[in-house]
Image: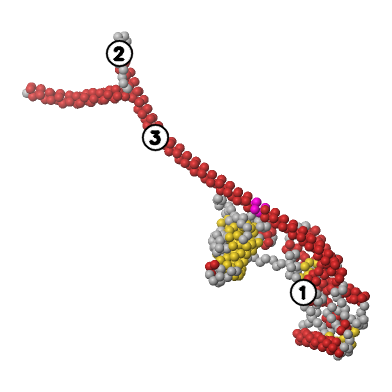
Amino acid sequence: MEEFFVLILSMLLVVALIPFYLWKRRQDSRSQDEQQQQERQVPRGETVVRATGTRRMRRRPAAGASSSRNVAATVEDAGDESDGEGVDGAYSEAKASKKEKKRQEREAQRQAEEAARESRLTKQDRYADMRRKKDEEREAKERMLEEEAKARQVKEEEAAALEFDKWKGEFSVDAEGSTGNDLQDGSQDLLSDFVEYIKKHKCLPLEDLAAEFKLRTQECINRITSLESMGRLSGVMDDRGKYIYISQEEMKAVADYIKRHGRVSISHLASKSNQFIDLEPKAQFVEEISNAEELAMYKREENDMKQSMRRQRNAVILHGKIPAATTLSFSSPHFLVEKKKKSFFPCKKLGNESKSRDGDSLASGNAISRCITIYPFHVCHGQTDDYTDPAAPPPGLDECNGIFLTYTFTSREKEYPKVKNASAQAWAFKSLATITNTGKDELKGWQMFVGFQHKEILVSASGAIIVDGDDFPAEVGNGTIFAGNPQTDLKTAIETAGDFTQISAQIEITGSVFGIKPPGVPMPKNIKLVNDGYKCPKATLKGNNPNVLMVICFFFSNMKVA
């Protein structure tokens, strides 16, 4: 029994010692691992045990353990710092490389912008120099033409003065028994009639005036010029062959109006000039006949009268009853007087012999019927100074609020040499390009691109110059850019009160084109405005009209300029 009890106690003791053994073994293995790690990290020096200071010897293991732990922590921190520094260095290098790349890109972009700006400035300087040279050449040509005009005017005045001295003898009176004094008096009367005729008609074609006095048109112009230099006439002669008489009082009224108001537009002055200048002929020169039958009767009687006078004159001359000098001629002042009498009095019968107011015998024979003769008169209404109709706006302009561009193909003719190959045949063409500012901003230095595509050769372009600087004739088969000359800027309608001459410009183009025969139309592929900041869509034809190309361009302030 006791042995069994001892065995149980032994077994309990063994079981109790097993955990203690395991714990001890774990502690020993841990201490060995720490020692090996310390030996690997920091080599330990030889420990010298001194005899003195037992207390120091007792504290040395604890200090060594703490120092080893500090050294291990320091080494670990150093390792962590070295690892962190490696990661930070790689990140810094990547960031620096990225910054350097961005800097290089910005530098390249800046250099490209500077190059583009220098190119644009160089092009603008070249264009300015070219325009300045063109202006100088034009001014020199204008001065030369002005000098030639002055010299020619002096010669014409001298010739007119000499011709005026002989003028009195050009209108002769073929009347029996007339003397030199009678001829001189008749010439003076005819001169007065010439002046009065112009003054009373106010505005009349030179051809009608020449036909009235049996003169050539150039002779009438010379007479009017001479009378103006003498101060007996004052007026203007337009390019349509009309002379408009303006009295000194009317001119003074217009001048006083300009002095009172200072700056006056041409359109406003033209409207006001209608109040100052009376261009209607005098009342005694205008006869109204409302009855058509009466007018037809007057015309028949007048024709009968002319035929009767012609037969009577021929019969008298052939039979020798009176000399031919007594017959009426259109150069006779008496005939002019009688003609005026015919014009203003009703029909009357003359006897066998009719006498003029001077008592000279004019005709002899049967009774002659003289009737009222109706002469056409041309009435001029108020016109502007240049006497041209105002330019009509291009079609489609009413719906535009930007820069309106049009290109209109007007005409063409086949040129020499005429060949059978249609693609080699040359055609002379004419076109009209317009640019109109209908926006709210002034357009400075406008430039219009026309995309020619049919081997065009330009011969002239009035109202513009070629930006590339080519002289005429210029090959523009790949398109060209026109710049305004002399009208380089287009103002707005707001600041010009809608003056169409200041807000628009026209380019009259003349040249040659190849390979397009009728009914084909050699139109450009596109037109657009190339000024900075403007954007234009694709140009389109106007409706079903293949001869008109149009486009509207708009200004965008946020557009990048190359």
Q: Residue flagged by tag 3: what amino acid is it?
A: Val
Element at badge 2?
Answer: loop
Asked if residue 202 lies in the magenta stretch, the reply is no
Instruction: Evaluate whether residue 381 shows in this view.
Output: no
Please state if 454 lies on the left or on the right of 212 as rendered.
left
Please state if 466 lies on the left or on the right of 79 as rendered.
right
Mark toward the start of the polypeptide (3 vs 1): 3
Q: Residue flagged by tag 2: what amino acid is it?
A: Val
Most foreground residue, 124 or 182: 182
Q: Residue at x 67, y 62 (%)?
A: 500
Q: Nearer the viewer, mark 3 or mark 2?
A: 3
- Looking at the rendering, the stretch of residues picked out in magenta corresponds to 128-132
Most foreground residue, 3 or 117: 117
Residue at the disc numbered 2: 48
Residue at the disc numbered 3: 87
Give the CA distance from mark 3 to mark 1: 104 Å
Mark toward the start of the polypeptide (1 vs 2): 2
Please state if 48 lies on the left or on the right of 459 as rendered.
left
Instruction: Evaluate whether residue 457 shows in this view.
Output: yes
Mark toward the start of the polypeptide (3 vs 2): 2
Q: Residue at x 38, y 30 (%)?
A: 82
Mark 1 packing: few (<14 Cα in 10 Å), some, or many (20+)?
A: some
Magenta stretch prevailing secondary structure: helix
Element at badge 1?
Answer: helix
Q: Residue flagged by tag 1: what amino acid is it?
A: Glu
Most extreme residue toward the top is 52
Please tell me in which quadrant of the rendered image residue 337 appears.
Answer: bottom right
Residue at the disc numbered 1: 207
Mark 2 packing: few (<14 Cα in 10 Å), some, or many (20+)?
A: few
- 534 in relation to 183, above or below: above
